[in-house]
Amino acid sequence: MSMDPPTKLAAELLGQSLSIPLAKQRLSYDESHLNEKLTNLLSGSTILPEELATLETVNDSITDSLSPAIKNLQLNKQRLVDSILTPYDNCIQFHTLLKRITATNKLLRALIYWNDIFDLTTVDGILICKEALIDLPILLSLSQISRQKIELDNAENKLKVDLQNKIEKLIKSSNNVNVNINDDISCIWDYSKLVNNKQQVVDDVFKKIVNLQVNSIAESFSNPTKLIKVISQVVNVQNLLLKLDGKQMVEQFWKDWSVAVGEKLKITLAKGGVIGRKLKDVFPQIKQIVETWPLEGQVKVIVVNVWK
C-alpha cells in the first residue's frame, strides 16, 4: 500500500534518530514559518474541518441518545430504593420488634406457669407451696432454705429495732438528773452480743451516742438554763462507753464530741444576736462544770477549750 508524501516523510523521520538539523534539512522549512505552514495546511485541506464537524455531530447525537437512558436509569434506581430497600429496612425493624415481643411473651408465660404450679402464698412472712408439691426433695429443700432466710432476716431486723429503741431511751434518760444511766447499760450490751459482727454494732452505737449528745446540746443553745442541765449530764455517757469498749472509746468520744460541739458553737456565735450573747455569758459556768469531770490529761484540755 503506497503512502502519501507527508505520511511517508513522517515514517522516515520516525525510523531514524531525530535531530533539529536533520528535521530542518528533510522538511525544508524554517521554524519561523511553522505557523504559516500549519495555517496553509488547514486552509488547503477540507478533510480536517469536516472530521471535526462530524465529531461534534456524533458527540451531540450520543449525548441526546444517552440522556433518556440515564434518566431512566435514575428512575429505576429510585424505584428500587422505594420498592425494595426501604421496605426491607422496615421489615428488619419489624422483625426485631417481633423477636422482643416473643421473648417478653415467653417470660410472661413462664412466670404464669410457675405461679400456677407452685401457687405461692405467704403465711406469717414464710412462702408456702402447694401440698402436692411440697414433699418433693428439691422443693422441700428450697422451702426450708427460704424459711430459714426469712427467719434470720426477721430476727436481725427485730434486733436492730430493739437496740435502737434502747439506745434512744438511754440517751434521753441522761437528760434527767433523777435517772441513773447505768441501769440501762446491761440491756444494750445483751442485745449487742447477739450480733455476729460485734465491732460494727459497737461502732454504730458509738456514732449514735455522739450524734444524739451533740444534737441535744445544739438544740439547747437558745436556752442557757437547759444547756447547763444537758452539759451536766454528758459525763454520764462515760459509764456506757466504758462498758461497751473501754477507755479508748471514751477518749475517742470526747474528741469527736468536742469537735462537733465546737463547730456548732462557731456557727451559732458567727450569727450573733441574742442567742450568741447568752451563750458567751454562760461559758464560764459551763467551763467550771467541765473542769469537775473525771477526765484525764489531753482529753480534759480538749473538752475545756471548747468553752473558752
Image: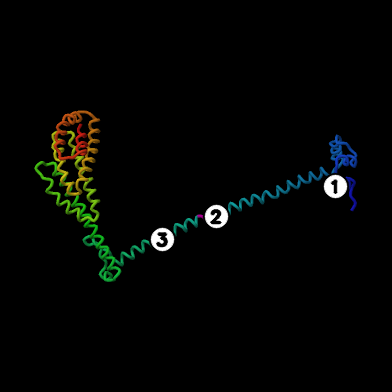
Q: The disc labelled 2 sits on which kind of residue?
A: Leu
Q: Is residue 95 above or below residue 281?
A: below
- Foreground residue among 81 and 3: 3
Report if residue 83 lies within the magenta region. yes
Per the rendered image, the range of residues in magenta is 82-89
Among numbered discs 1 and 3, the one appearing first in the sequence: 1
**Residues marked 2 and 1 touching at CB (< 8 Å):** no
Please tell me whether mark 3 sits on a helix, a strand or a loop.
helix
Residue 51 pos. (x, y %): 81, 45
Where is residue 52, by image quadrant?
Answer: top right
Q: Which residue is mark 2?
A: 85
Which residue is at the far front?
Answer: 297
Q: Is residue 16 visible?
A: yes
Q: Is residue 254 above or below residue 276?
A: below
Residue 137 pos. (x, y %): 29, 70
Marks 1 and 3, Cα distance to the nearest angstrom?
Answer: 82 Å
Please tell me whether mark 2 sits on a helix, a strand or a loop.
helix
Q: Which residue is mark 1?
A: 14
Label 1, residues with CA under 10 Å away: few <14, some 14-19, many ≥20 = few
Residue found at x 21% / y 34% = 305
Please tell me whether mark 1 sits on a helix, a strand or a loop.
helix
- Foreground residue among 115 and 304: 304
Q: The disc labelled 3 sits on which kind of residue?
A: Ala
Marks 2 and 1, Cα distance to the nearest angstrom?
Answer: 59 Å
- By secondary structure, the bulk of the magenta-drawn segment is best described as helix
**Where residue 134 is drawn, which disc sits there?**
none
Viewer-nearest of discs 2 and 1: 1
**Where residue 103 is drawn, which disc sits there?**
3
Viewer-nearest of discs 1 and 3: 1
**Along the horizontal axis of the image, is 5 left or right of 72?**
right
Q: The disc labelled 1 sits on which kind of residue?
A: Leu
Q: Quadrant of the C terminus?
A: top left
